[in-house]
């Protein structure tokens, strides 16, 4: 990192974009049960929308089964409705105390839909990282115009920023490759 220009904030923002993409990837279901599948499900309970994790316990008793146990049995219908209305494609089975979510085999069509979704999340992450680079380049240009850094320092920082951008875009691409392989796994 150059001595005059500190790019720590830019790197933190890029890391945040990468973490966000990885979180989004974890919500795309594969053929295996994972509690993170339910991370985006929000339940209408107690007069407001709440994340499912704040109103229920989620377990994986078998590789292809999730169970959702509400903290308050009175919220079980709201939880079932929230899971039904979500885009995860699971059919809740309510026995009055626990909601069971069997994870069906993914069809080829559903796999392709999930891959398209993963690619969309990856592209959003890449755009976010490029936006960080653009903002930082603009700031560097302003610093040079005001005479706070030299042209050499600006060029050095821009090269470093480009390397950082390439590194994080590459990490998103790697995560996408892993997610696609996981989705195609039969």
Image (cartoon, rainbow, N blue to C red):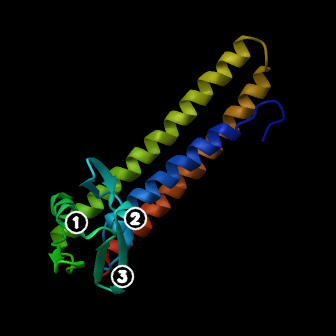
**Residue contact between numbered discs 1 and 3, judged by CB atoms under 8 Å:** no
**Residue contact between numbered discs 1 and 2, judged by CB atoms under 8 Å:** no
In this view, 163 is above or below 38: above
Report the disc number at residue 26. 2
Residue at 26% of width from left, 63% of height from top?
A: 114
Q: Which residue is mark 1?
A: 74
- Inspect this view and state whether residue 27 appears: no
- Inspect this view and state whether residue 9 appears: yes
In this view, 91 is above or below 87: below
Residue at 42% of width from left, 65% of height from top?
A: 177
Q: Nearer the viewer, residue 149 or 62?
A: 62
Q: Earlier in the sequence, mark 3 or mark 2?
A: 2
Q: Earlier in the sequence, mark 1 or mark 3?
A: 3
Q: Is residue 2 left or right of residue 155?
A: right
Q: Provide residue 2's location: percent of width, then percent of height.
A: 80, 37
Determine which quarter of the picture holds residue 108. Answer: bottom left
Q: Which residue is mark 3?
A: 60
- The residue carrying pointer 1 sits among few (fewer than 14), some (14 to 19) or many (20 or more) residues within 10 Å by Cα, namely few
- C-alpha span from label 1 to label 2: 29 Å
Quadrant where the N terminus is found in the figure: top right
Quadrant where the C terminus is found in the figure: bottom left
Q: Provide residue 68's location: percent of width, then percent of height.
A: 29, 74
Residue at 16% of width from left, 68% of height from top?
A: 109
């Amino acid at each position: 990192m150059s001595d005059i220009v500190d790019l720590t904030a830019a790197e933190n923002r890029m890391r945040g974009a990468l973490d966000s993409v990885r979180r989004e990837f974890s919500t795309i279901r594969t053929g295996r049960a994972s509690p993170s599948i339910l991370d985006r499900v929000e339940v209408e309970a107690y007069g407001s929308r709440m994340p499912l994790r704040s109103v229920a316990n989620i377990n994986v008793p078998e590789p292809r089964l999730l169970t959702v146990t509400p903290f308050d049995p009175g919220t079980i219908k709201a939880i079932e409705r929230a899971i039904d209305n979500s885009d995860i494609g699971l059919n809740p089975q309510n026995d009055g105390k626990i909601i069971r979510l069997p994870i069906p085999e993914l069809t080829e069509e559903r796999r392709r839909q999930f891959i398209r979704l993963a690619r969309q999340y990856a592209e959003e992450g890449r755009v976010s990282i490029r936006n960080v680079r653009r903002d930082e380049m603009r700031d560097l240009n302003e610093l040079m115009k005001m005479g706070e850094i030299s042209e050499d320092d600006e060029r050095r920082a821009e090269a470093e920023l480009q390397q950082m951008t390439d590194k994080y875009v590459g990490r998103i691409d790697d995560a996408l490759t892993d997610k696609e392989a996981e989705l195609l796994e039969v």
